[in-house]
Each structure stands twice: as C-alpha cells, then as structure tokens.
Image (cartoon, rainbow, N blue to C red):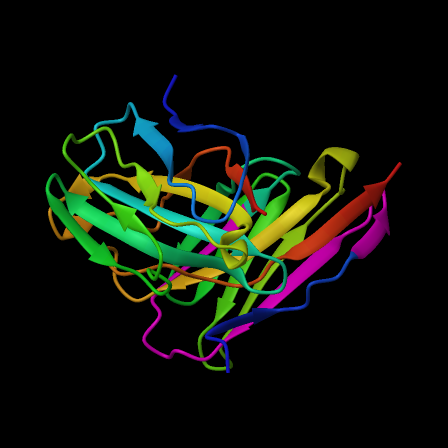
Amino acid sequence: EAQVTQNPRYLITVTGKKLTVTCSQNMNHEYMSWYRQDPGLGLRQIYYSMNVEVTDKGDVPEGYKVSRKEKRNFPLILESPSPNQTSLYFCASSGGQGRRATNEKLFFGSGTQLSVL
Amino acid sequence: QKEVEQDPGPLSVPEGAIVSLNCTYSNSAFQYFMWYRQYSRKGPELLMYTYSSGNKEDGRFTAQVDKSSKYISLFIRDSQPSDSATYLCAGLKTSYDKVIFGPGTSLSVIP
C-alpha cells in the first residue's frame, strides 16, 4: 500500500530535550516536505526537499533541522524544543523528478502530535 | 492578508443536504487549486484538484474555480455523515511550487 509513515504519532517532551520525528514514504517520490498545523493558521511549511541531499527552508524553519540522506526518509529534528513548537506535524511527499515535482498531488502522513512542556 | 482564506466554520448540515464550501485567494499567479479532506486525527488527503478556471466533477463532489473573482468552491451533493471532516483549500502557482493552504472549514453532517 502506498503510504507516508510518520513516527511517533504522539510525543510529549520537555523544553530542550532533542527529538526526532521520522518520516518514510514507499512511493519512490522525489519531493518531501514537513508542515506544522496550528488552529487558525492552517498548514505551514517548515522544510522541503527536492531530492537526496537537497533541502531548503519553508515558511517557518526556525528551530528545526532536516536531512535527506536517502530518498525514502526525511526526518525532522528539533535540537532544543520549546513550548511554541507544540503543534501537529505532517510529513508529505509528491512525485515528479527534480524541479518538476507534481505538488498538486501531495500525500500526507497521519501526523505527529507534539507537546513541549 | 493571508494568500488563501476560508471560513473556519464549524458548518453543520443535515444528511442529504447540498454543501457549499468556499475559499478566496489573493495570488493571481495561482494556476492549480486543490481541495483536501482531513478527518480527525488523520493527515489531509487530496479530494480534487483543478487547473485554471472552470468546473470539475467527481461523483458527489464538484470543484469550481473563478479566477476573475479569485474564488474557489467545493460542492457536495447528497451529503453523508462520512463527509464530516475539515476541508482545506489550497493554491499553487506551478506544479513544482510551494502549496499554499487555507486554514480549513470544519463540516459536520448530521444523520
């Protein structure tokens, strides 16, 4: 089954404790991205990657890191989480090749609800 | 001003009603327009997308884009309780650009 898998689904942590949210897709998609979803603000892009070893900032990258060492995986790293990073996070992927992504068809994971105390 | 705006609702309708969900956008460069459906505790899933102006129909769902007024609509005919979800509209300039999402409209279809 074609899917984007995120782990964990729920995470409670404390300020300053480094954490990683994993994302994996099995559709051989080149384009992957991370979003956070907050009430009233909708989905905002954190980082995206057009290809292996190619990543770029989205709208709200501060406090986050990503890496794309393999095509299928795109982990999101919070080096020193703060309470304002409490949010619902989604990983997404789409097909295409290089800059010619097909972002009109994004496939989303089930989300990670993060609480930073 | 947000690039894509929509009334957050919640919108509550009886089963069988025709539902109209609407968005406005400000970026005249948008060429692709999408509707995503998001069930509670799930990720958004693509419902429909259209390119440029016009209508697109898929079963009970019709997406309509009016680029002259920068208005996007989604119509749901014969609404069902299983349609209860948050609906996100989105715009895109080119296929490889960043997708801009609206905040979503929460819909409840009451049996």
Would residue B1 be found to the left or right of residue B19 on screen?
A: left
Q: Quadrant of residue B63?
A: bottom right
Q: Foreground: B36 or A63?
A: A63
Q: Foreground: A39 or A114?
A: A114
Q: Foreground: A66 or A78?
A: A78
Q: Residue at x 38, y 50 (%)?
A: A80
Would residue A96 be found to the left or right of residue A104 on screen?
A: left
The quarter of the picture where the C terminus of chain B appears is top right
Would residue A15 be found to the left or right of residue B22 on screen?
A: left
In the rendered image, is residue A34 in sight? yes
In the rendered image, the residue lying farthest to the top is A1
Where residue B26 appears, as percent x and y from the top left, is: 45, 80
Q: Residue at x 78, y 36 (%)?
A: B81
Where residue B100 appears, as percent x and y from the top left, is: 41, 63
In the rendered image, is residue B16 in sight? no
Where residue B49 appears, as percent x and y from the top left, is: 43, 51
Identify whether B98 is placed above or below A10: below
Q: How many marks?
A: 0
Q: Is A75 a magenta residue?
A: no
Where residue A64 appears, as percent x and y from the top left, is: 33, 52
Q: Residue at x 36, y 36 (%)?
A: A20
Q: Quadrant of residue A109?
A: top left
- Magenta stretch: dominant secondary structure: strand
Q: Residue at x 46, y 81 (%)?
A: B68
Q: Is B32 a magenta residue?
A: yes
Q: Foreground: A6 or B45?
A: A6
Identify whether A29 is placed above or below B72: above
Q: Quadrant of residue A2?
A: top left
Highlighted magenta segment, given as a residue range? B11-36
